[in-house]
Amino acid sequence: MIKMLKFASLPVSDQERSVAFFTEKLGFKVMTDQKFDESQRWIELGIGNSQTGIVLFTPQEHADRIGTYSGLSFKCDNMDKTYAELRERGVEFLGPPKRESWGTSVRFKDPDGNIFVMSE
């Protein structure tokens, strides 16, 4: 039976720039970085203690998805602290965190314009 989600794939236009963003600004770790074909590498990133990672890889048929809503949502322990720290590192947010009855969340972008959600 299925046990977990191993990774989610994120289409990007520049793998090197994306690795820098996710490792230097968000603190993710490179778990795998190897040649895939003549134009791309297979790059898996680890997120904190999570078993689920992100792959920075763009199948040719998914190139039109670069710079859109990613469908990926990240969790943090302290929204105010994390939001302030990531802003300091240059992460572009689409506005301040929103506090709702169901929780607090904020949206941000990577260098390609892919949009993510972060919540507590």
Image (spheres, grey):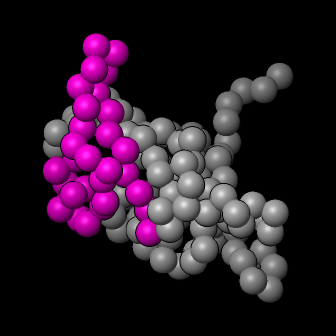
In the rendered image, residue 100, in percent from the top left (x then y), is placed at 27, 20
**Residue 61 visible at all:** yes
Q: Quadrant of residue 81?
A: top left
Q: Which residue is drawn at 44% across and 69% down?
A: 111
Above or below 19: residue 5:
above
Front residue of 30/8: it is 8
Q: Residue at x 67, y 36 (%)?
A: 5
Above or below 98: residue 43:
below
Kindly give the residue lying farthest to the top in the view shown: 101
> Left or right of 100: which side holds 64?
right
- Please state, as top left, top right, bottom left or bottom right, where the C terminus lies in the image: top left
Q: Which residue is drawn at 47% across and 62% down?
A: 113
**Residue 31 visible at all:** no
Q: What stretch is highlighted in magenta?
A: 83-111
Front residue of 120/96: it is 96
Does residue 103 belong to the magenta stretch?
Answer: yes
Does residue 7 belong to the magenta stretch?
Answer: no
- Please state, as top left, top right, bottom left or bottom right, where the N terminus lies in the image: top right
Above or below 98: residue 109:
below
In the rendered image, residue 112, in percent from the top left (x then y), is placed at 50, 68
In the rendered image, residue 117, in percent from the top left (x then y), is placed at 42, 41
Above or below 111: residue 83:
above
Give the total of numbered labels. Answer: 0
In the rendered image, residue 108, in percent from the top left (x then y), is placed at 37, 51
> Left or right of 19: which side holds 118?
left
> Left or right of 1: which side holds 5?
left
Front residue of 45/15: it is 15
Q: Which residue is drawn at 62% across and 56% down?
A: 10
